[in-house]
Amino acid sequence: MLSKVGYGSWAIALHIYFCSISAGVHADGLRVGFAEAPITPEVVDEWVDVNDDAQFDPEKDTWSDGNGNGRFDPVWIAGFQKKRAAQGVKDDLMAVSVVIDDGNTRIGIVAVDTIGLMRKFVLDVRRSLPAEWGIDYLLVHATHNHEGPDTQGLWGPGLFSSGVNADYMMKLKLSILEVIESAVKNLESAKLSVARISTDPRTPIKDKRKPIVIDEDMRALMFRRQDNSVIGTLVNFGIHVELAWDKNLFLTSDIAGYLRRGISEGIYYDDELRMPGIGGVTMWLTGNIGGLMTSGPTDPVYDVFLQQNINAAGHQKARAFGHSLARSLISAANQGNFKPSPAPSLKVKTSEIELGIDNFMLSLATLVGIVDSDPRLHFIPPFVRYSSEVAYIKLGNATITAIPGELYPEIAVGGIENPSGADFETAPQEVPNLRSQLPGEVNLMVNLANDAIGYIIPRSEWDDATPWIYGEEEETYGEIVSLGPDTGPDIHRAVLDLVKSAPQK
């Protein structure tokens, strides 16, 4: 049942409801099914970046007409500058799905190697789920891959030109449905174990905006058969999937792909196995990455297998970081560091939340259709408003919190400040920190879940006008791709309301 429970700033309409349960599709005990499939778009036309600026310019660059249709057919790569057309494919982009059924409730999670998926697309996927699959709730997650196709519209050939290919989006939707169907067919009895895993300090996350707050560690859920063989693993970690960086022109799943393949298949260098994997299917779920959580183009990353620092941005750095994370998880599994979750039951709650878009350029891009969403116009500020959602899943002694954008880690773990130069003189609004309110042994926080609303910034750190915070000489990155200063408090409030109202047993 859908019921209104109150209003916050920007007239938040918060609706909390339990997912309905389909009759006749569940069996006793925990069951899980995993599946994966490639979603790599075809790169039809090749081109040469004559001036080495990683931007296709038909007046300067040369290209070949692969399909003979007389026009350039690009795959626009998302995440950095516009006009970054793919030259080829390094490794496949993937859709990975898991279906979890505790005997009463069945949920699906699908993670895809794209920059982000708007809620309009997610709702379309949900409406297309056949009833006989028995899915009570579906979480759709984009890994925020900066080395895959534009699926939001912001990285096309010009300021007011979308980079989205409609045919690819239709194929992507069908691929997501197919991989969910495969996961349903693969359902089998399972037991759950959970772990919080420290990572190698030689492959550190960097916070590119003060205050320096990092939501560290990997959090993982592992599903095994009774013989202890691995069915699949969910891995949650907060770093931008972008280490190949902005000059890369080949489609790749970046660090997420290296981690997945390393955990499932083993870690290889030039066909030489350096560390056996644990088997099963591995799903990467991007954690809290606002701020900006990354490893920059000059930040050294230590390759623990080659025993050398990788300083330059590129595929080697992505491989080193992904393999380091995979090594940490494989070691934790081999050392028995995963804790069993006895008789795990599944609970799901979601909230629909109305957000205002104060960002003029995002409002314009939304209204003219560059960003494919469903905005609503109002006669009082903010004039453009938008519905999104948060979700909370409890499975045994683990939780999964679904965040529709890129959450600044200080909202999750604390450390919010009100520095000189901030646009608002106010105490931190997003308190208490979210992790302190989450029950269970291991708490996964998944960014870009069911939507892609941009950065979720603490209101007391909002800085869209001079003087700049912390004495910076220019505007810090974040506000440019955020809905507005009230998004942080609104999302924080919605998540806390969900957690407080959810049954804990």
Image: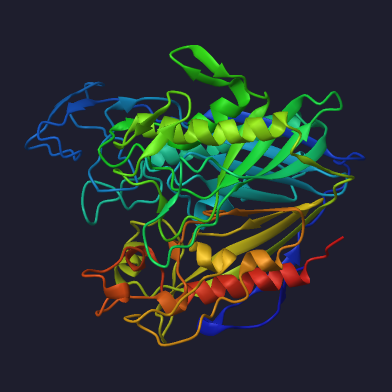
| 136 over 132 or under it: above or below | below
Compared to residue 426, the image places residue 29 above or below, namely above
Q: Position of residue 160 (x, y in %)?
A: 24, 56
Measuring 63% from the left and 50% from the top, which residue is drawn there?
Answer: 139
Q: Residue at x 62, y 25 (%)?
A: 264
Give x and y (percent) for residue 216. Answer: 55, 52
Q: Is residue 441 left or right of residue 423?
A: right
Does residue 468 appear in the picture of this structure?
Answer: yes
Query: Residue furthest toward the right?
Result: 28
Residue reaching furthest to the left: 59
Tell me the residue at 50%/18% (across/down): 268
Q: In the picture, which quadrant includes the C terminus?
A: bottom right
Q: Quadrant of the N terminus?
A: bottom right
Along the line of sight, which residue is nearer the eye, 425 or 179? 425
- Name the quadrant containing residue 123: bottom right
Judge from the rendering whether residue 63 lies leftward or rightward of residue 109; answer left or right. left
Nearer the observer, 226 or 502: 226
